[in-house]
Amino acid sequence: MYRLTIAILLVSGILIFACGDSKKATVKVDPADYLIQKFDQNGIERVSEVRRFIGETLYEYINGGAEIYHLYDFIEVVTADYKVGETEIVADIYSFENPDLAYGMFSTLRPLTPAPIGLGVEGFSFGSSLDFVKGNYIIRIIGYDETSETASAIEKLSNQLNSLVPGRTSKPERFAVFPQKDRIDFTEKIHAQSFLGQKALTDIYSMNFQIESDTITLFLSDDKGGGKFKQWFEAIEYDEASMKAAKSLPFDQPKALMIEDSYYGTIVAGLKNDNLIGIIGYKDQHKDFLLEWVNSLK
């Protein structure tokens, strides 16, 4: 209990002095400090030393897939084995440069139909593991089987770490500018690079919506000066009829894109108030929905 009290006081101090800016981490802490030796209240005890994998050494811990973590400015992961009663589980804490990047990486891990967990900003359980994102961190608890004992142990440790690990518990602010109506829960994503297969399309925020029987995707990215849009426009083939149709929408400059794609359907995009914005799966009946969103961007 003494160690837990000290750890909570430490976290409280961090919260008092930490800046709320989502783009910069102003307080550097060692995430290993959150993998404490014992949580007395639930009989949870660490039974290994804390292991650490920094930067490029992540591949030594993850069996494939380490590259994508680096697209979101991964810093390090600390990991340790815990025991709850007779059940052993593993706790990982992945650190990123800022909360948006942590959420972006989390959004690539989220299953298509997640079982949501009310921890941190957002969380889900999948098989014998549980993931949630909070502040600059993704926390993952992993069991060795799918028994009720393991599920209970995972729940207890995840609740303790959620209480101990500091950080923002709201989604990135950019998602607030998307429409509130007809949104599909748990579809927010941040794409670090090559969105829609285009090298120019980096740091793209997207969300899905249900419009009657259609599922469409809206996307948005900062594009002051229009560099991303220009590179995209120059990289594709298009026809004048499609360009003319796209120009009827209230974008900020004459050039706009309307692309027919065999996989994504119709894609419409343009610039609005220093933002590259667009829609995937567009049909004529979605025009009013798109117009309302475009005109709301100030």
Image (tube, grey):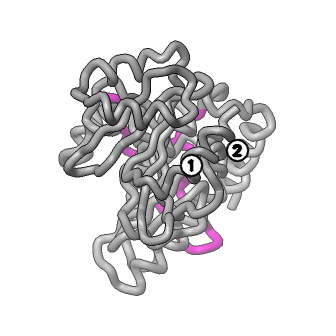
Residue at position x 39%, y 34% from top? 192
Amino acid type, residue under disc 2 in the picture: Val
Magenta part of the chain: 29-55
SS class of the residue under badge 2? Answer: helix
Does residue 166 appear anywhere in the picture? no
Which quarter shows the N terminus? bottom right
Q: What x and y, as percent, mark residue 292? A: 63, 47
Q: What x and y, as percent, mark residue 233? A: 33, 22
Amino acid type, residue under disc 1 in the picture: Tyr
SS class of the residue under badge 1? Answer: helix
Asked if the residue under mark 1 is in contact with the one under mark 2, i.e. CB atoms within 8 Å, the reply is: yes
Q: What x and y, as percent, mark residue 175? A: 59, 45
Magenta stretch holds residue 122: no
- 5, 129: nearer the viewer: 129
> Sequence-wise, which precedes: disc 2 or disc 1?
2
Residue 73 against residue 132 in the figure, above or below: above
Q: Residues within 10 Å of mark 2 (few under 14, many from 20)?
A: some
- Residue pointed to by mark 2: 11
Residue at position x 64%, y 33% from top? 22
Magenta stretch holds residue 43: yes
Position of 146 with respect to 271 (left or right) is left
Which quarter shows the C terminus? top right
Q: What x and y, as percent, mark residue 33? A: 56, 44
As drawn, the label of residue 34 is: 1
